[in-house]
Image (cartoon, rainbow, N blue to C red):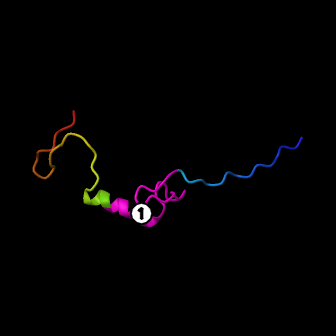
Amino acid sequence: MNAPSRKPPEPKTTGRCPICGKPSAPDRRPFCSKRCAEIDLGRWLKGAYTVPGEPVGNIDDGTLDEFE
């Protein structure tokens, strides 16, 4: 009995790029290109994106809350 030969699955796009809306590239997921990935990184570094939560203070002025 010979099993039918299977070809490897083709890479598929898994959604849309969150920056420009084009189909995402498998090697850059979830982005479509290096450009969009770098735009997103820049937004994180500039503070455009935030993670909700309680403020924890500032390490520079000594008001950083201690973790219990």
Up-down: is 3 above or below 32?
above
Residue that appears at 76% across and 49% down: 6
Where on the picture, by quarter, is residue 11?
bottom right
Q: Residue 4: percent from the left, percent from the top?
A: 82, 46
The quadrant of the rendering that contains the N terminus is top right
Question: Viewer-proximal residue, 57 or 42?
Answer: 42
Up-down: is 5 above or below 43?
above
Q: Which residues are magenta?
A: 15-42
Please name the residue that numbered disc 1 is placed on.
Answer: 36
Residue that appears at 39% across and 64% down: 38
Tag count: 1
The quadrant of the rendering that contains the C terminus is top left
- Identified by mark 1, the residue type is Cys
Q: Is residue 22 left or right of residue 45?
A: right
Q: Residue 10: percent from the left, percent from the top?
A: 65, 54
Q: Residue 66: percent from the left, percent from the top?
A: 18, 38
Of all residues, the one furthest to the bottom in this rendering is: 35
Q: Is residue 52 left or right of residue 61?
A: right
Up-down: is 66 above or below 50?
above
Where on the picture, by quarter, is residue 37?
bottom left
Residue that appears at 27% across and 49% down: 50
Up-down: is 63 above or below 36?
above
Secondary structure under the numbered disc 1 in the rendered image: helix
Residue that appears at 15% across and 45% down: 57
Q: Residue 59: percent from the left, percent from the top?
A: 16, 49
Question: Viewer-proximal residue, 7 or 24?
Answer: 24
In the image, residue 1 lies in the stretch drawn in magenta: no
The secondary structure that most of the magenta stretch takes on is loop
Check disc 1: other Cα within 10 Å, few if <14, some if 14-19, many if 20+: some
